[in-house]
Image (spheres, rainbow, N blue to C red):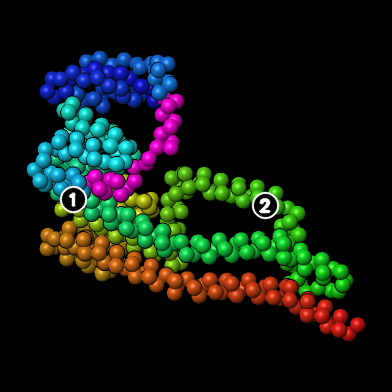
Amino acid sequence: MPLFSYKGRNARGELIKGLLEGKSSGAVAEKLLQTGTTPIDISSHQPSKITLDLHKISLQGLFAEKIQQTDIMMFSRQMYSLLKAGIPIMRALAGLKLSTENKALANVIGDLYQSLDSGHELSVAMRDHPKVFSSFYVSMMRVGEGTGMLETVFLGMFHHLEFEKFMRDKIKSALRYPSFVMTAMFIAIVIVNIFVIPAFAKIFLRFGQDLPLMTRVLIGFSNFTVNSWPILLMLLVGLIYGVKSLLMTKAGRYEWDRLKLKMPIAGKIVRKATLARFARSFALSYKSGVPIVQAMSLIAETADNDYLADKINQMRLAVERGESVYRAASASGIFTPMVLQMISVGEESGSLDDQMQEIADMYQSDVEYEIKTLGEQVEPIMIVFLGILVLILALGIFLPMWDLGRVALRK
């Protein structure tokens, strides 16, 4: 989008200048008005040679330190501690900018400080950094500003991000062992086809004896692999590219997210972890005073699974029509009967946030248990696959060797 330079006055009447991207000058003016700035002059910005040189220098940012989720967690925790101690937010940001070791995050905090100094609200300033602060984070800050509970929201976001990181790490840990075993099996099959079977094939053909069916199949498959590996490599690259292209589409990503939840063993872990994140996010939003409909909309936007995000949006629409959260959750089909009962009790007693917190804790415990027993669930499947592989190799390689050995002894 084109870049526009602007001049305007904030709520205190101070003159501010800057650059904004927009489809047109009218779109830029609308953005300024939304941030409480009255535009005075908006003109198209033409980058100078110096600016272009700076853009070239900015390529060095590829090698700069990145802002990790743990950095945002520590920022949230430190802001809570400083605000609770009675330190004004401007002083808190200035102090964090100087003490933060991550230079990229320090620059973001500096931008927040300058934006607040220009008269903008903290949530508005954070919205200018979508790669650092998610829409859910920004919305929670807006709620904290409106209710005067900013320090409480910072603490809630710290626990929320900590939980998000915990669940992501658990899911990666759950999928690491099966992925490693399957990769090792694939590499073993490739090595056997390219190096082992051709060596035995030369020995078998030298004797000129009839070979068993399984041996002929193995030799044929090995010859095809060795002679046609460029075609197979192109097919593999094309398959990877096709899958990635499909996952970039909305329909493809939705279908993949739906199938992920139905995968054996790993699917239920991903499902429970995602629902735990939903329940904890809902509890945090509801406890902070966010309306239920708005909370569901925010949680759906930040969900990592498009299929479950669609189910959450269906729940939101049902609540907008006047249905209870219990009826909406029942119609979604993603919660167990026990969880639905807990939602019903929470809604009737007015403690829906507490019940959602309990649901999140329950799902978290289930995920931890599933991951602890993952090895016991995966090992039988891996043993069966390895047994089949060994059986095929035994029938295809060792049986002909025994036959050839008997023929050699007769001679």
Q: Residues within 10 Å of mark 2 (few under 14, many from 20)?
A: some
In the image, taking residue 241 as reference, residue 372 lies left or right, namely: left
Q: Main secondary structure of the magenta part?
A: helix
Q: Residue at x 15, y 34 (%)?
A: 90
Mark 2–mark 1 distance (CA, rounded to whole Å): 53 Å
Residue 56 image offset from top left, x and y in percent: 44, 25
Say which element carries label 2. helix
In the image, taking residue 213 as reference, residue 382 lies left or right, namely: left
Q: Residues within 10 Å of mark 1 (few under 14, many from 20)?
A: some
Q: Nearer the viewer, residue 335 or 173?
A: 173
Residue 66 position by quadrant? top left
Outermost residue, right side: 411
Residue 128 image offset from top left, x and y in percent: 28, 33
Query: For mark 2, what is the residue?
Result: 232
Say which element carries label 1. helix
Magenta segment boundaries in residue numbering: 55-76
Residue 350 position by quadrant? bottom left
Residue 214 position by quadrant? bottom right
Query: For mark 1, what is the residue?
Result: 155
Residue 210 image offset from top left, x and y in percent: 84, 74
Specify whether residue 370 is in view: yes
Is 263 covered by the magenta stretch?
no
Q: Tag 1: residue type?
A: Leu
Q: Residue at x 82, y 66 (%)?
A: 202
Q: Tag 2: residue type?
A: Leu
Q: Residue at x 35, y 16 (%)?
A: 44
In the image, taking residue 186 as reference, residue 380 lies left or right, namely: left
